Image (cartoon, rainbow, N blue to C red):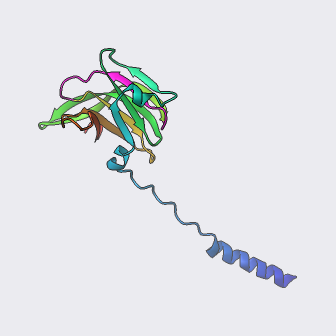
Amino acid sequence: MRKRMVVLLLFAILLSAFGCNKPEPKEPEPITTEELLQQIHVVRATEELTAPYKAVHEYVQDEEGEWLLIYTDIILEDFSFIGLENDTKNDVIFFTAGEKYFTTEQFVPGKPLLLQFRPIGTIPWHGISFEDANGTMRYFILVQSTRGEGEAPYFFIEFENGK
């Protein structure tokens, strides 16, 4: 009996020393801008594009403006449609997130944002912000395309808030 207890004790010591080592948790890989932009979309809203959705978020900033549909393939936490402020430093323009016009705790696939707004001038005044899967706040400018026919009329460019 005593021999069995010694063997069991020895086995428990060896198991705790060598057998139960858990690997160190890995830091999540940073999510690249390119990966995000493949999963966040902005298009001109049409009845054909909005019809399949049972529910949408809706925000009207300007009743005379253009309708856009922003949708995602992934869950975005703390999502906002924002105003932008800008300034220049050494002849370089930089943007800062301004007023939050629309916010939701979770922006999810299947429930897009139907947005009516009017772009003003050539400098962008609107964008989006959200927390990515790694907990990092990300900021994107909503840019009206000047690429020509056949190209998307709007797209996003990431910016560092206030830099």
Residue at the image point whose x is 45% and y is 55% from the top: 28
Relative depth, front residue between 127 and 40: 40
Classify residue 163 by image quadrant: top left
143 vs 146, nearest the viewer: 146
Q: Relative to 42, is 5 above or below?
A: below
Q: Position of residue 73 (x, y in %)?
A: 44, 42
Residue appearing at x 45%, y 57% in the figure: 27
Query: In the displayed structure, does residue 46 sit left or right of residue 6?
Result: left
Q: Quadrant of the N terminus?
A: bottom right
In the rendered image, the vertical position of residue 138 relative to residue 80, given as above or below: below
Q: Residue furthest front?
A: 48
Relative horizontal placement of residue 81, taking residue 86 as reference (left or right): right
In percent of width and height, residue 43 lies at 33, 33
Residue stretch rendered in magenta on the structure = 108-123
Image location of residue 56, percent across then percent down: 47, 27
Between 28 and 61, the one nearer to me in the picture: 61
In the image, is residue 66 part of the stretch drawn in magenta? no
